[in-house]
Image (cartoon, rainbow, N blue to C red):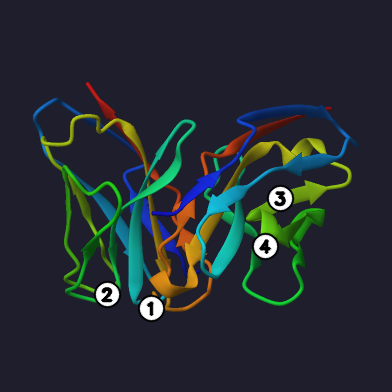
Amino acid sequence: DGGITQSPKYLFRKEGQNVTLSCEQNLNHDAMYWYRQDPGQGLRLIYYSQIVNDFQKGDIAEGYSVSREKKESFPLTVTSAQKNPTAFYLCASIRDHSSNQPQHFGDGTRLSIL
Amino acid sequence: AQSVSQHNHHVILSEAASLELGCNYSYGGTVNLFWYVQYPGQHLQLLLKYFSGDPLVKGIKGFEAEFIKSKFSFNLRKPSVQWSDTAEYFCAVNPKAAGNKLTFGGGTRVLVKP
């Protein structure tokens, strides 16, 4: 079945460490997105990529980095510069960033700071 | 920047009661509008969407939403809820000129008592 796979489901990090969240899709979608979900704040866009080797900052990019070396993969690194990294992280994709179609979402990764 | 407001953070109601969740957005141009639902332990799923045409949109599971342009609103309704409608509901907006960059509301947690 086609879909978006995020791993791991739960992730724990010590303060000061960088950590990378995985997002893989086999939907042949060009565009991919990373959101952060906090209680009462909905989802906020961190980074997005319209096509391979391209990515752009979203609304809350500080303390995060991404890469898009392959069409199916869009890993998110939470760096030590992110002051409040504990959150639920969601990856999404869509065939074409300029289309009107709704985004498909993965199951998410819950990141906690030890 | 646009914003999306969902007025109710928590809603508790009994089975067979009617549900209405408010959503207002601030953006002067043309928009695409979405309602997503997140059932406990599941990923975010599209409930319904509005791109153009009839402002009354019907979605899955008996939900509908009405786009009122003059009020910048896109309220979600269901005439008679079931226990299985217990979930968190998110309204999302993307300006047509901005590609597929979604702005989400803060979400409304709905608890339906059996």
- Which of the 4 image quadrants contains residue B72? bottom right
Amino acid tagged 3:
Asn
In the rendered structure, the residue with mark 4 lies on which chain?
B
Would you say the residues marked 4 and 2 are in contact, meaning their CB atoms lie under 8 Å apart? no
What residue is rendered at 82% in x and 48% in y?
B78
Task: Give the mark nearer the N terminus: 3 vs 4.
Answer: 4
The image's mark for residue B69 is: 4
Q: Position of residue A106 (x, y in %)?
A: 44, 55
Amino acid tagged 1:
Asn
Q: Which residue is mark 1?
A: A28
The image's mark for residue A71 is: 2
The image's mark for residue B75 is: 3
Amino acid tagged 4:
Lys
In the rendered structure, the residue with mark 3 lies on which chain?
B
The foreground one among A81 and A26 is A81
Q: Are marks 2 and 1 on the same chain?
A: yes
Q: Nearer the viewer, mark 4 or mark 2?
A: 4
The answer for how far apart the CA atoms under marks 3 and 1 are is 33 Å
